[in-house]
């Protein structure tokens, strides 16, 4: 008997009040706001049924709501500090059975990587899957392709039980911090590319992704493997943001995720 595919909803966190690069999610990349680049790339996923932007009720994020309204993107607004609550209510409102958590500062997010991670999650019948987790796990995908997948039941349990600030701010730590509490898998790349930084937290990061999009003539349909090939041809690109330190899941949201 073939089981029906669950309803899979991608939820993209986005806000304007980043400390290191305010307004970054609407920064221009080859003529389009970064958040639009993220949404359009996620929409190319084969397995994702709906894409939601989850922003905050702060007036600073009215611009995100406007962008979503203008472009027909689904948008839900919630708590600025309690991102777990924001994501949970977005998932509940849109009847998600499986949640794919993404962030709006990753304009190179890859639909193939999303589908690979979701596919591993579905095949393994776990509560949570990710293609990167903090130590002692080792990152093998570039920073900026981060994809986390969980069941609605697991998210709801975290929403009810998580009581540490970083667990509320970063959504998923409750699912993986205590071994054995949930069934989890880590999806690794066939080679280690974890040193590469393709997220946007600083002006250097933004310059790098602008350079990358320029190489692909402003298209959205290039893959992460094409970016790897680009870096092989132009290794100087990786030097643009090589010195930028990466924030961890223990850092405050005001400094880290959207």
Image (tube, grey):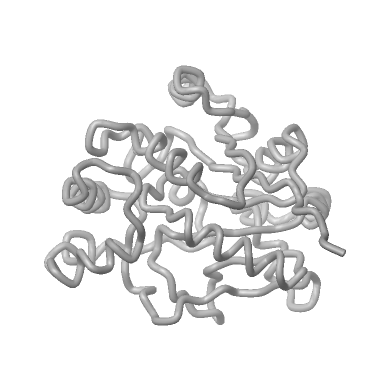
* Residue 211, position as x, y percentages in the image: 17, 50
The residue at 64%/34% (across/down) is: 79
Q: Splitting the image into 4 quarters, where does residue 94 fall? A: top right
Q: Is residue 178 positioned above or below 45 on the image?
A: below
Q: Is residue 136 above or below residue 101?
A: below
Q: For the view shown, which residue lies furthest in the front direction?
A: 1
Q: Name which quarter of the figure residue 40 lies in.
A: top left
Q: Nearer the viewer, residue 169 or 186?
A: 186
Question: Which one is nearer the viewer's eye here, 246 or 89?
Answer: 89
Q: Is residue 90 above or below residue 137?
A: above
In percent of width and height, residue 42 lies at 49, 46
**Left or right placement of residue 253 versus residue 153 in this view:** left
Q: Indicate left or right for 254 with 83 as reference.
A: left
Q: How many marks?
A: 0
- Name the side, left or right, on which 227 lies relative to 247: left
Percent from the top left, x then y, of residue 1?
87, 64
Task: Measuring from the top left, give residue 205's x and y in whole percent.
Answer: 26, 52
Q: Quadrant of residue 83?
A: top right
Q: Which of 193 and 81 is in front in this view?
A: 193
Vertical relation: 125 (above or below) 205: below
Q: Which residue is drawn at 51% across and 19% down?
A: 69
- Residue in the picture at 12% in, 66% down: 234
Farthest residue in the right direction?
1
Q: In this view, does 229 lie to the left or right of 111?
A: left
């Amino acid at each position: 008997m073939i089981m029906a595919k669950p309803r899979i909803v991608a939820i993209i966190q986005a806000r304007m009040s980043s400390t290191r690069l305010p307004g970054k999610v609407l920064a221009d990349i080859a003529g389009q706001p970064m958040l639009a680049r993220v949404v359009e790339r996620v929409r190319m996923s084969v397995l994702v049924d709906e894409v939601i932007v989850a922003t905050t009720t702060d007036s600073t994020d009215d611009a995100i709501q406007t962008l979503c309204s203008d472009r027909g993107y689904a948008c839900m607004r919630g708590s600025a500090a309690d991102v777990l609550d924001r994501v949970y209510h977005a998932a509940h409102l849109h009847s998600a059975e499986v949640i794919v958590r993404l962030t709006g500062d990753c304009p190179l997010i890859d639909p193939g990587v999303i589908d690979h991670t979701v596919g591993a999650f579905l095949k393994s019948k776990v509560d949570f899957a990710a293609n990167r987790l903090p130590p002692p796990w080792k990152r093998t995908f570039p920073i900026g392709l981060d994809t986390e997948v969980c069941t609605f039941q697991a998210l709801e349990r975290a929403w009810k039980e998580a009581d540490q600030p970083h667990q509320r701010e970063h959504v998923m730590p409750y699912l993986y911090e205590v071994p054995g509490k949930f069934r989890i898998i880590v999806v690794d790349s066939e080679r280690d590319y974890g040193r590469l930084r393709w997220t946007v937290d600083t002006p250097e990061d933004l310059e790098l992704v602008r350079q990358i999009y320029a190489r692909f003539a402003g298209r959205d349909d290039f893959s992460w493997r094409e970016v790897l090939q680009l870096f092989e041809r132009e290794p100087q690109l990786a030097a643009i943001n090589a010195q930028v330190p990466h924030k961890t899941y223990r850092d405050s949201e005001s400094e880290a995720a959207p």
